[in-house]
Amino acid sequence: MARATAGPAGANPVGPASFRNSGATPGAGSGAFVGLISGTSADGIDAALTRFDADGTARLELGRTYPWDPQLRARLVELGQGAALQSLDEFGDLDVRIGEAFAAATLQLLEEAGAAPADIAAIGSHGQTLRHRPAGAAYDGHHPFTLQLGDANVIAERCGITTVADFRRRDVAAGGQGAPLLPALHAAMLASADEARAVLNLGGIANLTLLPCDGTGAGVAGFDTGPANALMDAWCERVLGQPYDKDGRFAASGTVDPALLARLLDEPWFALAPPKSTGREQFHIDWLTARLGGTEAPADVQATLMQLTAATVADALLARQPGTRRVLVCGGGVHNAALLQAIGERLPGVVVESTAACGLDPDFVEAMGFAWLARQTLAGRPGNLPGVTGARGPRVLGAIYPGNLSPLD
Ligand SMILES: Nc1ncnc2c1ncn2[C@@H]1O[C@H](COP(=O)(O)OP(=O)(O)O)[C@@H](O)[C@H]1O
Ligand SMILES: [Mg+2]
């Protein structure tokens, strides 16, 4: 499913007027950054070579999704769904293996782009989430935490590029959810003075950013709404042996089961008010099977899961920003035509379209976001929005792992 986008310079321009960085020093952090993320779906490593002009304009120069080693991916998926770690040795090994994979992705991206490491100001690496237990999550321990692996020492060492990583944990330490982190970027790039908008990221989990109509990004809200592809992928894997439901055709071949949909919607998490975030440790295959009657046709379950995503997204949007005129969709779910149609049907009068309509490649918005977060950190600027994550205040996020200091190193 590797997707690639290579546009001529200027293919994805975002107008300077729409990209503000409060407190930005003109020129600070201009240059090229690489953003890296593997999301909850663990479908691949998204890498975005992103250029920032001195005025803050961001442009995707090259975006690529690099596949995981299949065995490593299978283990990451198991662990993400709650499987126990074998040992501390496995933990250390995984951290380095993920770091190596992210470094290799960066080097390949740069080669394909014809860029040299010396051209890159910094890498922003999200890593791979192994566990997300923010405040409010039900689990056996006491302390909220979130854990992303992918040793940034390895990335900095292999690439010779300063690497910023571990973006979420400072926000959690400050009482926040550590997520979502991209509403500030969405506000800067996609808010409009003419209409209330929302940005919908359909990854493994769905999250919404609400952009009121003032065009300034003030009053922006953002939160997870529940599963997007996580459960649909898991069900597809189980009954079809396929990693995902291409274009939603399997779901479209089934009929929604209203009783099952009601049981799924009964999950108390959906009724929680923001700030809230979640992951596959909550919405995993066992969560689904515990709610099945046992006699449902597989395609009907898929159709119902698709409606679960559509209903939780639409209900949250209608409750929190009823005047929304346009929903801009990014993340892999944007390629699921049946899902987009289902969301649109629940939002009459609202335009539901890809962020591509605003010049942003939907497959790389998130990876560009981590390039942006690295730039924020290097410039000493906050990356979180406390109103979104629930943190006690704005925080400069992540840790900086310097690249090679001189050719003698
Ligand atoms: N053509 C398609 N049809 C349906 N679903 C798709 C398609 N392409 C991608 N996807 C979905 O998008 C997911 C990956 O989305 P992504 O935004 O990378 O999620 P994450 O951030 O969780 O990694 C895949 O696992 C798959 O479910
Ligand atoms: Mg992904």
Image (spheres, rainbow, N blue to C red):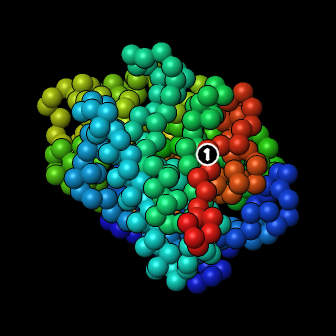
Number of numbered discs present? Answer: 1
Under tag 1, what secondary structure? strand
- Under mark 1, the amino acid is Ala
Q: Position of residue 190 (x, y in %)?
A: 69, 58
Q: Position of residue 309 (x, y in %)?
A: 42, 41
Q: In the image, what residue occupies the spot 62% across and 35% down?
A: 170
Residue 267 location, quadrant: top left
Q: Is residue 149 left or right of residue 12?
A: left
Q: Is 2 above or below relative to 236?
A: below
Residue bearing mark 1: 399
> How would you rate the neighbour count of disc 1 (Cα within 10 Å): few for under 14, some for 14-19, many for 20 or more?
some
Q: Is residue 351 left or right of residue 234?
A: right
Q: Position of residue 245 (x, y in %)?
A: 28, 55
Q: Position of residue 224 (x, y in %)?
A: 53, 37
Q: In the image, what residue occupies the spot 38% across and 59% down?
A: 101
Front one among 331 and 402 = 402
Q: Quadrant of the C terminus?
A: bottom right
Q: Is 402 above or below relative to 179?
A: below
Q: Is 288 above or below relative to 365?
A: above
Q: In the image, what residue occupies the spot 80% across and 62% down?
A: 28
Q: In the image, what residue occupies the spot 47% across and 23% down?
A: 137
